[in-house]
Image (cartoon, rainbow, N blue to C red):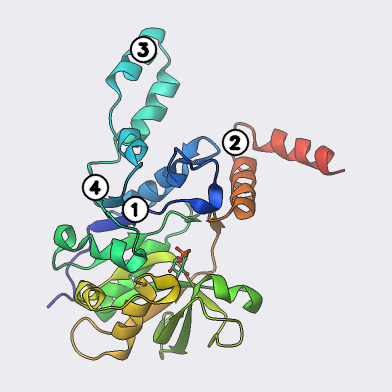
Amino acid sequence: MTLGKSITKAVIPAAGMGTRFLPATKAMPKEMLPVVDRPAIQYVVEEAARAGLDDILMITGRSKRALEDHFDREPGLERALELKGDTERLAAIHEASELGPIHYVRQGEAKGLGHAVLCASQHVGDDPFAVLLGDDLIDEAEDLLTTMMEVQQKTGGSVIALIEVDPAQISAYGCADVSAIDGEDFVRVKSLVEKPSVSEAPSNLAVIGRYVLHPSVFGVLETTEPGRGGEIQLTDALQTLAAGEGEGSGVYGVVFKGRRYDTGDKLSYLKAVITMASERVEFGEELKVWMKAFVS
Ligand code: G1P
């Protein structure tokens, strides 16, 4: 019985090729693109750590060594900063290496998000676990992941995060058909479809990159055929769980109304960087003054 087992594991898929950011990502993982002064992936690992997930598995692939280096110690650099007495920068580089041990497994072949998650099965074993996608950054002040973990513990199923989008944008996301549950502030997911056309979409509720999954998803992923884009889709496996019965089936949704930053394409990445920079105490106000002058 998985219900009630505490959740300690986070899986962070980071094997994608980053084609939307070429040429920047020709020789550098897209997860390393800086958002103000930290690589995007660091925000995601910090979010997992804040939610109490202390066992982190990153799914990487070829040309992703920079990720491992970033979260590792760098004794040469540490010594140089110590000698200079630069305690501020020393603390900044320690932040990344002190996020706890991170485990890595390589995906080998880019066969889709569902396949990337399946690569975590041996490490995760028989416990519910979280999945965090690096293209979505959730504001530090939000506790989305904790809420989702509570819903998983309560329902014993799998939990997805949903946002309402402009109906014209739904084809960029997984889309959920949901129904309300009496007395609860989360919803039951009746069905899911990956990146439907606007006319096929059952709602304007889009799946964003946070999941808390029952381990039965692994068995389902093993038999999930390639779907949209010829890739093994996590959405398709969740659709099977939503339609199924018995232990580990059932999918629930938390409709998120808080602040989220999308770094998935160039324009939204730029907006995310500007928004987050404008909130930094060190230079946010100065930046806003400059931006006003710039646009006028
Ligand atoms: C993936 C999922 C999709 C989800 C999206 C959220 O798509 O397959 O269902 O809506 O993440 O960011 P991707 O953006 O990797 O194509």
Disc 4 vs disc 2: which is toward the camera? 4
Residue under circle 1? 48
Residue type indicated by callout 2? Val
Alpha carbon separation for disc pair 2 and 3:
27 Å
Mark 1 is on which residue type? Ala
Q: Secondary structure at mark 4?
A: strand
Ligand 1 neighbours mark 2 (CB distance < 8 Å): no
Q: Say whether disc 3 or disc 4 marks the residue closer to the N-terminus.
A: 3
Under circle 3, the secondary element is helix
Q: Which residue carries the number 3 mark?
A: 80
The quarter of the picture where the C terminus appears is: top right
Q: CA distance from mark 2 to mark 1?
A: 24 Å
Mark 3 and mark 1: Cα distance apart in space: 30 Å
- Residue 225 at x, y percent in the picture: 31, 78
Q: Give the percent coordinates (x, y) of residue 2.
A: 15, 75
Task: Please say if 184 is above or below 109.
Answer: below
The residue that mark 2 highlights is 281
Of tags 2 and 3, which is closer to the observer? Answer: 3
* Nearest to N terminus: mark 3 or mark 1: 1
Residue drawn 43% across the image and 54% down it: 134
